[in-house]
């Protein structure tokens, strides 16, 4: 194994209860190839460490004025009010494995484990595959992924994972490109492989008003998911107004392009008509 491999992680969140079975630690990988209009983790889009600025906390003391771009970590030492914080830390495989294995007893007692999320964890697939090899004899592993990755990267990582949370954004290629910025063909191809593999997975669909909550869109999702596979259930995650709250901290503008005030349609009948287990979360 190459212990020199590194990855940029923007959060290691302990005691998570909704990212897989039991008590879990969720590792958020930085960087995402999609640009979903409703993204609620803008700090995870760039693959590089960046500065988040919370203007309301700034005392205009000037301590940060002379910090060099290649020494972002110094910001947190000189900013007494934490108005500027660095988002993203570079880890080696041994460092992160050691951090996660420290809670192995907690995971074992609760039936929990570690979940890899993002951003898009498959953007750093070589690191993730090596990390999974160090953890998997001891810890249950899950991944939440858009599936937008090369077939080799997707299969290499997923083959090492116990449970997959496969996100799906829109079944229609034209609409998918409009709302996420990428063609869904690689996602759909990887989904077909996932179904054929029999690997246990949960399909997660962010339910966005006026974007993918129509009966036609849900029927399209059902067609993608029908048939023999390891599908455990479909989770519909209704859009919430807090999605855009962090954009200003990352120096980005939130312009979703859909009616945020409208409640998404949560009707499950298009899934149930195909015998697919679905629930609104």
Image (tube, helix red, strand yellow):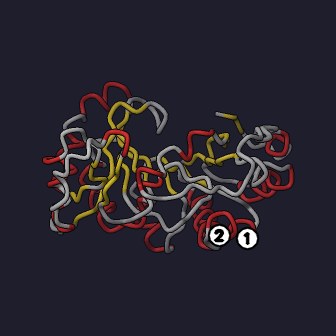
Residue 79 vertical position relative to residue 91 in the rendered view, above or below: above
Q: Residue at x 18, y 40 (%)?
A: 80
Q: Residue at x 46, y 63 (%)?
A: 32
Q: Which SS class for mark 1? A: helix
Return the residue nearer the eye: 56 or 44. Answer: 56
Left or right of 90: which side holds 114?
right
Task: Give the mark, 1 or 2, whose residue is nearer the N terminus.
Answer: 1
Disc 1 packing (10 Å; few <14; some 14–19; many ≥20): few
Residue 123 in picture, x, y percent from top left: 41, 67
Q: Which residue is mark 2?
A: 184
Return the residue nearer the eye: 268 or 39. Answer: 39
Numbered badge on residue 156: none
Residue 176 in picture, x, y percent from top left: 69, 66
CA–CA distance between discs 1 and 2? 6 Å
Q: Which SS class for mark 2? A: loop
Quarter of the image where the N terminus is located: bottom left
Q: Is residue 81 visible?
A: yes
Residue 275 in picture, x, y percent from top left: 79, 43
Dots 1 and 2: beta carbons under 8 Å? yes
Q: Which residue is mark 1?
A: 173
Left or right of 270: which side holds 93?
left
The answer to which image quadrant residue 221 occupies is bottom right
């Amino acid at each position: 194994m190459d212990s020199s491999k590194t990855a940029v992680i923007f959060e290691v969140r302990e005691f998570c209860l909704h990212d897989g079975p039991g008590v879990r630690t969720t590792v958020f990988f930085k960087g995402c190839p999609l640009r979903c209009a409703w993204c609620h983790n803008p700090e995870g889009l760039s693959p590089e460490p960046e500065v988040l600025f919370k203007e309301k906390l700034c005392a205009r003391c000037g301590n940060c004025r002379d910090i060099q771009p290649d020494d972002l970590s110094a910001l947190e030492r000189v900013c007494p009010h934490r108005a500027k914080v660095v988002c993203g830390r570079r880890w080696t495989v041994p460092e992160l494995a050691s951090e996660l294995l420290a809670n192995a007893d907690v995971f074992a007692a609760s039936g929990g484990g570690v979940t890899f999320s993002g951003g898009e964890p498959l953007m750093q697939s070589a690191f993730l595959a090596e990390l999974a090899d160090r953890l998997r004899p001891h810890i249950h592993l899950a991944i939440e992924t858009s599936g937008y990755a090369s077939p080799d990267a997707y299969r290499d990582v997923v083959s090492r994972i116990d449970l997959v949370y496969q996100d799906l954004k829109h079944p229609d290629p034209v609409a998918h490109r409009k709302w996420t910025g990428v063609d869904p063909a690689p996602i759909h191809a990887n989904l077909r492989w996932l179904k054929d593999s029999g690997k246990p997975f949960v399909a997660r669909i962010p339910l966005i008003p006026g974007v993918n909550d129509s009966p036609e869109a849900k029927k399209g999702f059902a067609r993608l998911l029908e048939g023999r596979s390891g599908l455990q259930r479909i989770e519909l995650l209704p859009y919430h107004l807090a999605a855009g709250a962090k954009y200003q901290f990352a120096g980005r503008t939130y312009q979703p392009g859909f009616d945020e005030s409208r409640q998404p349609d949560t009707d499950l009948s298009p899934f149930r008509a195909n015998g697919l287990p679905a629930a609104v979360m």
